[in-house]
Amino acid sequence: MLEIVDPGLQTTVQDYPGRLGRQSLGFFPCGPVDHLAFRAANLLVGNRLGAAALEIPLGRFQANVLHAGTIAITGPETHLTVNGKPVSLWESVPVKEGDVVASSVIRGPGYRLYLAVAGGIEVRDAFGSRATHIVAGIGGFDGRALERADVLDVVATNEPARRKRLPVSLRPTYSNNWEVETIMGPHADPDFLTNNDVEHFLTATWRCDLNSDRVGVRLNPHRFQWARETGDVAGGHPSNVLDNSYPLGGILAYGDVLTILGPESNSSGGFAVIATIPEAALWKVGQFRPGRDTVVFRAIDLAQAAALHDHVAQVLDTRHLDRSGNGG
């Protein structure tokens, strides 16, 4: 069990892949914005990869340990301690009753940490998932971000405590200036965007707006030429379309503003989705720092997206973990 002392900016309980099969009811899946670091944290403590764990934006966090167990924290570099003594990210760490786990604000590249506890965090299932959907107020811990004095239960486990470490060579690299793979469409050229629009989209450096969160990452405004004058029956702006389903990771053209759809976005609407970030590359978006980071998009095809998926699967292969025996 963990007692929250400092919940930080907006720490939530998430699981992976979240609340699938509910988009027709208006629910995007939720789950972690950076699914790679999230699953790696679970891997390091011996959980199934999708077990409920904590997402900690900006890094500031502190909790008291109420029962002995094993934790792992993954994500960008920050100052991580147990009882004031430094410990490493991307490694399993044994903790005992009375220990204090703390992390500081992330100063360098990256934005979100993930904390997993052996056994997984125990919260009630809501529509097939334990993931917090803050907008709807369901899932996680009472459907909200954690607050001071919240106590989190942990699923009991008989897994022996073994120190595990993800090799540095397999850990993701964080940046302030990202390159993110994307597949053009479904509303791209030639029906929606001009060739010049596509060229600009793929060569411009886009800035992550300060008003970005789990719902979506807003990018700086840009006026596209568009391949049509209006949205016809859908509306007056060329970005208007008849309401249709939105994909997770879709890059929505809301008039002159592009928005990357996050795990708590609207499930449908009436604006063009000019490109879609493949699932294997979405973890990068989870590490964008609002108001600071930039991104350049690189177009790939379905075969390349499948290769990215295979690469992520290799990172999360248990055979690649370094092990250092029992109990630390």
Image (spheres, rainbow, N blue to C red):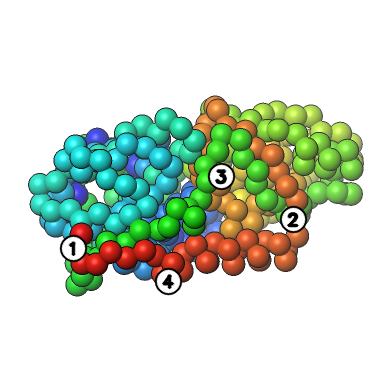
In the drawing, does residue 55 fall left or right of residue 258?
left
State the separation of the CA atoms marked 4 and 3.
Answer: 27 Å
As helix, strand or loop, the secondary structure at mark 4 comes to helix
Query: Label 3, on which residue?
Result: 285
Query: Label 2, on which residue?
Result: 300
Tag 1–tag 4 contact (CB < 8 Å): no
Mark 2, other Cα within 10 Å: few <14 / some 14–19 / many ≥20: some
Q: N-terminal of the two: label 1 or label 4?
A: 4
In the rendered image, the vertical position of residue 52 relative to residue 251, given as above or below: below
Q: Amino acid at mark 1?
A: Gly
State the separation of the CA atoms marked 2 and 4.
Answer: 29 Å
Can residue 27 be seen here? The reply is no
Percent x, y of residue 194: 89, 42
Q: Quadrant of the C terminus?
A: bottom left
Residue drawn at (20%, 67%), measured in percent from left and top?
Answer: 326
State the separation of the CA atoms marked 3 and 2.
Answer: 17 Å
State the separation of the CA atoms marked 1 and 4.
Answer: 20 Å
Q: Amino acid at mark 3?
A: Val
As helix, strand or loop, the secondary structure at mark 1 comes to loop
Residue drawn at (67%, 61%), measured in percent from left and top?
Answer: 305
In the drawing, does residue 195 fall left or right of residue 71?
right
Query: Label 1, on which residue?
Result: 327
Tag 4–tag 3 contact (CB < 8 Å): no
Query: Label 4, on which residue?
Result: 319
Q: Amino acid at mark 4?
A: Arg
Mark 4, other Cα within 10 Å: few <14 / some 14–19 / many ≥20: few
Percent x, y of residue 71: 26, 55
As helix, strand or loop, the secondary structure at mark 2 comes to loop
Percent x, y of residue 82: 20, 43
Q: Amino acid at mark 2?
A: Ile
Res 234 → quadrant: top right
